[in-house]
Image (cartoon, helix red, strand yellow):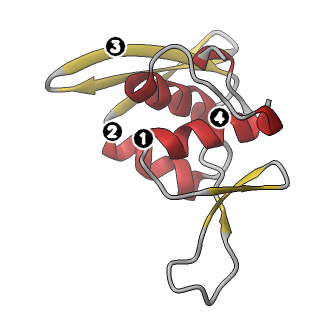
Amino acid sequence: MKTSELKGAALDWAVAKADGLEFIVINGGVFIPDEDGVDEPYQYRPSTVWDDGGPIIDRENISVWARGNEWAAETFTPNHQGDEQEGPTILIAAMRCFVASQLGDEVSIPEELV
């Protein structure tokens, strides 16, 4: 699937994969297992929840700006600039940008998330 078309659980899955997180898919959602096994797995939604996506934007130095009715995002690091992506929200644009910078312009997404 093209990174520029990722959304919803497919985008959340790609972000988790790009970030090297340990995760599981339950009922079409991406979950982070509890490390000590006491609590339920945490649903991971970086494309819609600021507590999940915001730290990635900050850590990866992703710039985001308005472009017409959409948002655009681009990575800026000392050794890398590029991977510009767009989306209907800041988080979607930024998470697509992060995935593109780590996994490229196309990602193989599990069938249950497409």
Furthest-bottom residue in view?
A: 38
Q: Classify mark 1: helix, strand or loop.
A: helix
Q: Mark 4 points at which residue?
A: 11
Q: Residue 82 carries which label?
A: 3
Looking at the image, can residue 71 be seen? Answer: no
Q: Residue at x 67, y 72 (%)?
A: 41
Residue 25 lies, in percent from the top left, at 72, 53
Q: Contact, CB < 8 Å: mark 2 with mark 1? A: yes
Q: Mark 1 highlights which residue?
A: 57
Q: Earlier in the sequence, mark 4 or mark 2?
A: 4
Q: What residue type is labelled 2?
A: Glu
The amino acid type found where label 1 is placed reads Ile
Local SS, label 4: helix
Q: Give the number of the disc on residue 60.
A: 2
Disc 4 versus disc 3: distance between alpha carbons? 19 Å
Which amino acid does the dot numbered 3 rest on?
Gly
Number of residues whose C-alpha sits closer than 10 Å to that of mark 1, classed few (under 14), some (14–19) or many (20 or more): many
